Amino acid sequence: MGELFASSAGQDCTAGKYLPHFAEKSRHNLGGWGLGFFRDGRARIEKSSESVYAGGQVHDGFLRLARVVDSRLIISQICAPQADRPKDSLVLPWSAHFLHHHWLFGFRGDSRKVLAYQSPRPILPEALSSVAARVWEFIRDGMEAQMQVWPDQNLYQALALTCQRLTTDYPGDYLFFLANETVLFVFLNQGEVLLYQPPEARGEALVLTTVSGGLTGDPDHWLAFVNADRSRGQLLIISGADLLYQGHL
Amino acid sequence: MCDLFALCANRSHGAASSLPLFAARGRRNVHGWGIGFFRGRQPVVEKSAEPVFRDGRAHDSFQRLARVVAKPIILAHIRYRSSGQVDECHAHPFALDFWGQSWLFAHNGEAGAIESYRSRQAPRLEADSDSARTFEFLRDRFAEAASRPTHPTFLQILQEALAGLIRQYPGEYNFLLSNGRFLWAFSNHRQFLLLQGSRKLEDALLLTTIEEGLSPENWRTISLREGTGGKILLIAGGDLVLEEDLWPLPACPTISGQGLPVRQA
């Protein structure tokens, strides 16, 4: 399935304390790793199809990036093993530019049905059998279509209605992180997302992950958002160090 | 009636053309002005009790500030006194700390009932007006919510606070509230005008209460929905991220905020 990580802060900030734990705890996922962030308003991604953990150590490149990358929003994904060794380009997170923003997208989930979705403008045409690629295209296309039909709509409504259509038209398990330079949206209709406010950040940053038990020694310090009803997902809106909104579709 | 202005962008953005237009179109407000923004986490407010527009031109200092301030979020307020004295201390925006952050607040509307509110929290604002008491009321509700074990979202607390405010102290509330990273706007009596996608503004967004907007462009009017207690907007970067009615109608296509789940044993 892969695992997801995000950090959100009011100002550029590293996630050097939590990303190595994220890699260690996701070590069973051998399908590569990616780290996405924002620089000068543009999405940047560093990724590798190599395993994030080998020989008892976290990948050297991942560790160095964890220490150095500072950004208001960081999304990292450690991908599940694939039948074939994946190309770097197919490792998540991915980025795209739409609705006047650069966006980062990390995903875990499964749905055979969504593979039937054919985007008029494929983002990753080479990823024919990738559920994540079809979901990414569906979200981009859906939000653009919503905004075209109803330009006065807010981002949340465009995304919520798109997610509603996704889960109705293509039932399945979906959990994704979607971020532009200032806002992180989290959608899930299965599984759980854990949220943590690092005490050392003094209210200036928060960390999210799908890794069970969280990334610190005490799971009770992590706030869990659980979704069991696949037909009724939930959305979170985060900006800076604040959870601004949480609600079910 | 006072008027409100906000500029929101992803990056630092100037308001050299829009702020003077705001001053000109809001010239009937003759009891002071203020411009607020954040330097890092610190709020910065420049304000005056003098009219923002006189003898056919905007106040000299207002114009100078309009030319030099460039931030991701800029708030401005021009005042027509309905409560409190006419002096610099009663001009908006006001600044207070809560929820672990500093906030700027600018208000318009007559809300005489809230003048009797006495906060038990410190500090209290020096101004003796409905706007100052309203800001303290909101601050106090957030301070109380901080100790709740259920970890409510910011929107939940704001909705509860506003519902309580209007129930206990009926009045006209139309305000901007920002921590420098995002902006909340609320109104239960006036419309907002919003401009997005303007070529001059690039990726920035403008919000104002000036009825005709600040330019001949395609300003969107955000009005209250009948039967609701008000309209809440969340703006981050150059986007309107969320638009909620204070008491949503069942027909609303979105989503009811719920109590946050706590970790299950």
Image (spheres, coloured by chain):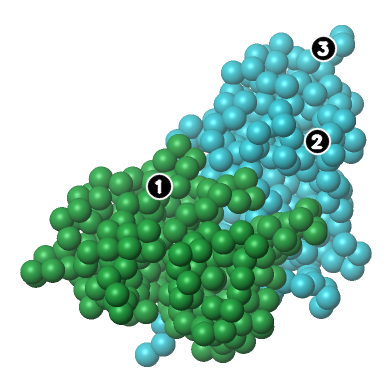
Q: Quadrant of the N terminus of chain A?
A: bottom left
Quarter of the picture containing the C terminus of chain A is: bottom right
Disc 1 residue type (three-letter): Arg
- Residue closest to the eye, A157 or A111: A111
For the view shown, which residue lies furthest in the left direction? A55
Q: Residues within 10 Å of mark 2 (few under 14, many from 20)?
A: many
Q: Nearer the viewer, mark 3 or mark 1?
A: 1
Cα–Cα span, label 3 and label 1:
46 Å
Tell me if residue A154 comes above or below residue B125 in the rendering: below
At label 3, counting other C-alpha atoms closer than 10 Å, the crowd grade (few under 14, some 14-19, many 20 or more) is few
Q: Provide the chain ID for the residue under circle 3.
A: B
Residue at (17% x, 60% y) in the render: A59
Chain that bears disc 2 = B
Q: Are marks 3 and 1 in contact (CB under 8 Å)?
A: no
Residue B147 to residue A111: above or below: above
The letter of the green chain is A
SS class, disc 3:
strand
Tell me the crowding category of disc 1: few under 14, some 14 to 19, or many 20 or more residues within 10 angstroms, Cα based: some
Q: Mark 2 = which residue? A: B3
Q: Which residue is mark 1?
A: A44
Q: Which tint was used for chain B?
A: cyan
User: Do marks 2 and 1 share a subunit?
Assistant: no
Q: Which labelled disc corresponds to residue B57?
A: 3
Q: At x 54% / y 45%, what residue is drawn?
A: B181
- Do pointers 3 and 2 mark residues of a single chain? yes
Q: Position of residue B10 (x, y in %)?
A: 56, 40
